[in-house]
Image (spheres, helix red, strand yellow):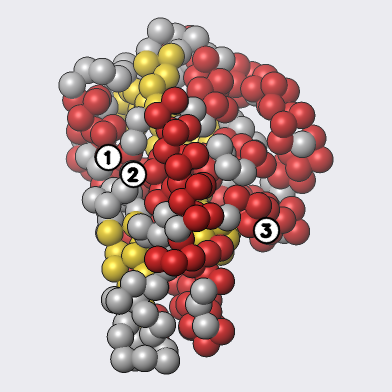
Amino acid sequence: MSQKKRVFSLLACLMSVLVLPCCLYSAESDNALAGSQSLVIRFSHTVANETAKGQMALKFKEILEKSSQNRIRVEVSPNGEMFNDDQIAESLLLDYVQMAAPSASKLTEYIKQLKLFDLPFIFKDMKAVDAFEQSDAGQGILDSFTQRGLYGLGYLHNGMKQLSANKALKVPADAKGLKFRIMNSDILEAQFHAVGATTRDAPFSQVYSLIAGGALDGQENTWSNILTKDLYKVQPYITESNHGVLDYVVITSVAFWDNLQDDEKTLVREALKEAIAYGNSIASQKDEEAKQKIVQSKQAELISLSKDQRDQWIAAMRPVWKKYETEIGKELIEKAVNSN
Ligand code: SIN
């Protein structure tokens, strides 16, 4: 974590303790269901509206505004227009936003066990990811958010990550010396170091321009993010590696949540349950459609790996698990593996 981020985090924690309880309900958001004014929930995220997460956020808005008869309003801010994901936890703690769904990778500074999701090749597909998330172990990770002043309200799917680059990546040696964009996660850094590549941690909103400008050679992401951010237009090769998972945790702050009235909590919880189920039901289909659109565009070449080539990536990246075994917990890793 950079010095700047540390200072910001520290300030955020102090603010959450000292200031937040006084400023939770502004004139605009004064307790909704009792009075005439609306409670406003700002939902900030970094992806396009047409992705599964974007659609889930809009669905949440639609359901909640209807069920509360507009006494609770949801302002959805997509594409990192309000905050980048690396500022999101602090923004929640400071009550600038009240709900977000950052990737697990971007929350690993807060909840160490989330590092599990970044281990390369730990889940074979999204079915296994879902099984783990719904297990006691997965739900236990959500429970641990309260230690950090946050509530983990649920998991939301995106999909499996693919590798893209300005050269064809067939075997690990092809990645040697290339610079890849990563989300802020030391495991993702270690994963690329394992194949002789370097990394740069950057917000999602900057990935396209950093690649187009030549500051980066490659990146990893899901098909839907590669499509909706036009990354396939600046990355001539995409390797269908399915080497990792990009999933989200829907979060709010304890301070915000605890200040809601019981009936408000019920409405929010119900709307969220339905919206998450909707987002999760369309995620795989969105990802597959995005892949097909990219292939049809012919702007990037799709590289499918042979079994032998894929085994080489696994052999090169798997040692990262050992390095993080103690920090994440051997038992938790085993439970994730057993979800496959
Ligand atoms: C997201 O899907 O929310 C962004 C992922 C990324 O930063 O690559």
Query: Where does residue 176 sit, x and y in percent of width and height?
Result: 44, 9
> Dot 1 corresponds to which residue?
205
> Dot 2 corresponds to which residue?
84
Location of residue 151 by image quarter: bottom right
90 left or right of 331? left
Q: Nearer the viewer, residue 312 or 87?
A: 87
Q: Nearer the viewer, residue 46 or 321?
A: 46
What residue type is disc 1 on? Answer: Ser
User: What residue lies at 56% left-to-right and 39% top-to-bottom?
Assistant: 108
Q: Judge whether 254 appears above or below 310 on screen.
A: below
Q: Judge whether 160 appears above or below 29 on screen.
A: above
Q: Judge whether 47 appears above or below 75 on screen.
A: above
Q: CA distance from mark 1 to mark 2?
A: 8 Å
Q: Are marks 1 and 2 in contact (CB under 8 Å)?
A: yes
Q: Nearer the viewer, residue 96 or 202?
A: 96
> Dot 3 corresponds to which residue?
143
What residue type is disc 2 on? Answer: Asn
Location of residue 87 by image quarter: top left
Q: Earlier in the sequence, mark 1 or mark 2?
A: 2
User: What residue lies at 48% left-to-right and 65% top-to-bottom?
Assistant: 21
